Amino acid sequence: MERVEEFKVGDWVRIRPTLTSAKHGLGAVTPGSIGIVYCIRPDSSLLVELSYLPNPWHCEPEEVEHVAPFRVRKTQITFVLLRLFVSCLHYMTLLTNLSYR
């Protein structure tokens, strides 16, 4: 029997890469994916938020493992947001120019 780790809401977790089936079903979940614990249910099962799913994935604690949170320096975030903003402005300008033709 594998030791089950304690989880709390907000923990970053990875779906175990070796997982081939899950108690509540895998659905569109890809083993090895990283998500965040969204909810701990009264039966101790978890709801994990994954970026590519529209709803949290229901799983058992032994189906996931803790991972270190992904951290980005503030300067990197600022640069990415600035590039995104400039790209959006450029796209809006193109749309505006096309609508006046």
Image (cartoon, rainbow, N blue to C red):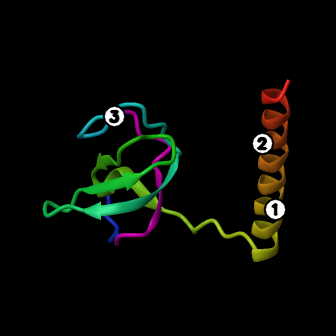
> For numbered disc 2, what is the local secondary structure?
helix
Chain part drawn in magenta: 8-20
Real-space Cα separation, disc 1 to disc 3, in angstroms: 42 Å
Residue type at the position of mark 1: Leu
Q: Residue at x 72, y 69 (%)?
A: 72
Q: Residue at x 81, y 49 (%)?
A: 89
Q: Which residue is mark 3?
A: 21
Residue type at the position of mark 3: Ser
Who comes first in sequence, dot 1 or dot 3?
3
> Do residues under tags 2 and 3 come within 8 Å of each other at their CB atoms?
no
Q: Is residue 53 left or right of residue 1?
A: right
Q: Which residue is mark 2?
A: 92
Residue situated in front as seen by the camera: 26 or 81? 81
Q: Which residue is mark 1?
A: 82
Q: Residue at x 24, y 40 (%)?
A: 23
Helix, strand or loop for the magenta stretch, by majority: loop
Quadrant where the N terminus sits is bottom left
- Residue 6 at what x, y percent from top left? 32, 71
Mark 3 residue crowding within 10 angstroms, few (<14) / some (14–19) / many (20+): few
Who comes first in sequence, dot 2 or dot 1?
1
